[in-house]
Amino acid sequence: MIPNIFFSNCKFVLTIPLLYLYNLSLSTGIFPTVWKTSFITPIYKGGDISSITNYRQISLISIIPKIFESIISKKNYSFAISINM
């Protein structure tokens, strides 16, 4: 429940603690349960406002697992490219 603007403003201070958390998660093979939590928000698509079928769901997750996923996907992509060559 920490706003993203906090991470943007404090990115230089938070780099080392987040690096430690990410490395700990990778070395232990444990992805913290808190990072798996998402909040569902209904977004109105159109039509009758009172009908639930006229809404779609958006899952909002914290920026911490988003950054972690971005780092892992970049590493996996570069690893997969190097294997194929």
Image (cartoon, rainbow, N blue to C red):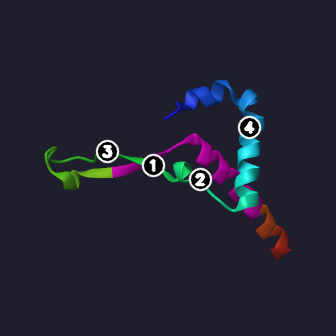
- Per the image, label 2 sits on a secondary structure element best described as loop
Residue receiving disc 1: 38
Q: Is residue 6 above or below residue 31?
A: above
Counting residues from the start of the chain, the first of labels 2 and 1 encountered is 2
Task: State yes or no: discs 2 and 1 in contact (Cβ < 8 Å).
Answer: no
From mark 2 to mark 1, how far is it between C-alphas? 13 Å
Task: State yes or no: discs 3 and 2 in contact (Cβ < 8 Å).
Answer: no
- Name the spot of residue 53 as percent of width and height, x first: 21, 56
Q: Is residue 19 above or below residue 80?
A: above
Q: Which residues are magenta?
A: 57-77
From mark 2 to mark 4, how far is it between C-alphas? 15 Å
Counting residues from the start of the chain, the first of labels 4 and 3 encountered is 4
- In this view, the residue in front, 74 or 37, is 37
What is the chief secondary structure element of the magenta stretch?
helix
* Amino acid type, label 2: Pro
Residue receiving disc 2: 32
Residue receiving disc 4: 17
Residue 68 marker: none
Residue receiving disc 3: 43
* Amino acid type, label 3: Ile
**Rendered residue at 65%/46% (across/down):** 67
